[in-house]
Amino acid sequence: MFVSDCLNVNLRGHLTIGGCDTLELAEQFGTPLYVMDEATITQNCRKYVESIGTYYNSRGRVYYASKAFCCKEICRIMENAGMGLDVVSGGELYTAMSVGFPADRICFHGNNKTPGEINYALDCGVGRFVVDNLTELALLNTLALARNKKPSVLFRIKPGIDAHTHNFIRTGQIDSKFGLALETGEAEEAVRQAVALPGVSLTGMHCHIGSQIFDIAPFELAAEVMVNFMADMRDRHGADLTELNLGGGFGIQYVPGQNPVPYDRYMQAVSETVKKTCEARDMETPFIMLEPGRSIVASAGITLYTVGAVKDIPGVRTYVSVDGGMGDNPRYALYQAEYAAVVAGKAAEKPTETVTIAGKCCESGDLIQEHTAIQPVQAGDILAVFATGAYNYSMASNYNRIPRPATVMIRDRQPRVIIRRESFEDLVRNDV
Ligand SMILES: *Cc1c(COP(=O)(O)O)cnc(C)c1O
């Protein structure tokens, strides 16, 4: 009925998440409110971890892409789930280290790591650096030597694959700020340099071909391209590459009708491609790394808002304004991301109205969704937007000096605050 299994309707006709009545959650914790179901997150982790066991003989690791949703508690949950962590900034790394996340299970990404971030990661003993470009390679080598370290390095490669996704979130193309291109010889030049550098140990290759992908074929093609490149680099430069990071990008259901590929089918198909290509190139199957972000947390989360003004413009449209908006969910404003919503107190009723859900920021583009079907709605109603567990809190801002919402995590029907609501004092904390 809904886009996620953790959502349901109780006898009062109210939307529930993880067995908790969303109207009660809104009453108890206030709105806007992010709510997440922990069982959904841990189940998603388990599926990935188990498929590494099944299809790669457990020779691999799943790294949660923490940019999807990063806070201390999610790092603790990931550690308990046996996951690794992918971080892309000093701040994400700091969050992980602040709860004692094992540094050897962290993979450090980013297309422009600063010297400060690199030094911090070296001091933490981060397990893998995914190096994006030649400037970073030289910098990392210098900084590592100065600290008497020799970090493991993977190269971020642009395999040049079109994953049929939205332009703004496509990253496997040659015209991308991320990674080293194969076609131009740039990636090979990086390998040639790296094998001669004393401060880095080149152990593997990485690619991430996009986000919210629903097809298996681009992942298979990327795996084939990557394994062949690794074999070429062995043959031409003697590079001993034993690790292959295939990135994330697995699609989820935001709105009814979207059909994500079951993880298992993806894992099976891609593992066969990897093994077949390795065999053809006389190469051992590498240690496989995956980096799902969205598909771990998105469907575990919803956002609860209180409806204010409902503005019916005859012959044009109806704006339903909520007490949040692009500050807590900028994804529609950024790239017209799709979302479905319900009036939480009427979750069992048919959606009969077509409305535009608007935020409270001073921007006409501050919309959560346009022309979406919901139940009849009026001021004071609680509105629930689905699948907001990824790239909402982590992309949130204080635009218009609106405090960021709290995040509540539910386990065994018990809600607990894992991120406190920001206060007005928080907003001026750094003002001088
Ligand atoms: C964003 C990103 C991910 C996670 O992508 P999802 O679509 O959230 O699964 C993984 N790896 C890299 C390098 C990324 O940039």
Image (tube, rainbow, N blue to C red):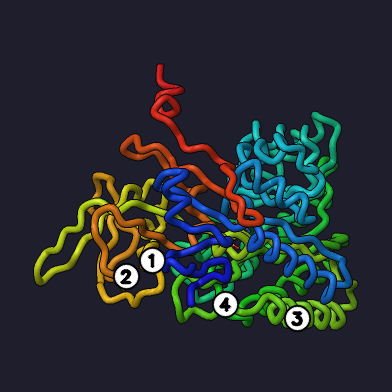
> Are there few (<14), some (14-19), or many (20+) residues within 10 Å of tag 4?
some
Badge 4 or badge 2: first in the primary sequence: 4
> Where residue 326 sits: x, y (%)?
36, 50
Quarter of the displayed picture in which ligand 1 can be seen: bottom right
Number of marks drawn? 4
* Mark 1 nearby-residue class (10 Å; few <14, some 14–19, many ≥20): many
Q: Are marks 2 and 3 in contact (CB under 8 Å)?
A: no
Label 3 sits on residue: 268
Q: Quadrant of residue 188?
A: bottom right
Nearest to the observer: residue 144 or residue 29:
29
The CA span between labels 1 and 4 is 19 Å
Q: Which residue is pictured at 81% across the width and 30% down the height?
A: 147
Q: Please report the residue visible at 50 percent of the width from the left and 72 percent of the height from the top.
A: 3
Residue with the mark numbered 1: 341
Q: Which residue is mark 2?
A: 374
Q: Amino acid at mark 4?
A: Pro
Q: Which residue type carries mark 3?
A: Gln
Badge 3 marks a residue whose secondary structure is helix
Question: Which residue type does callout 1 highlight?
Answer: Ala
Horizontal relation, residue 190 to residue 390: left or right: right
Instruction: Select label 1 or label 4 by which is in front.
Output: 1
Q: Which residue is mark 4?
A: 260
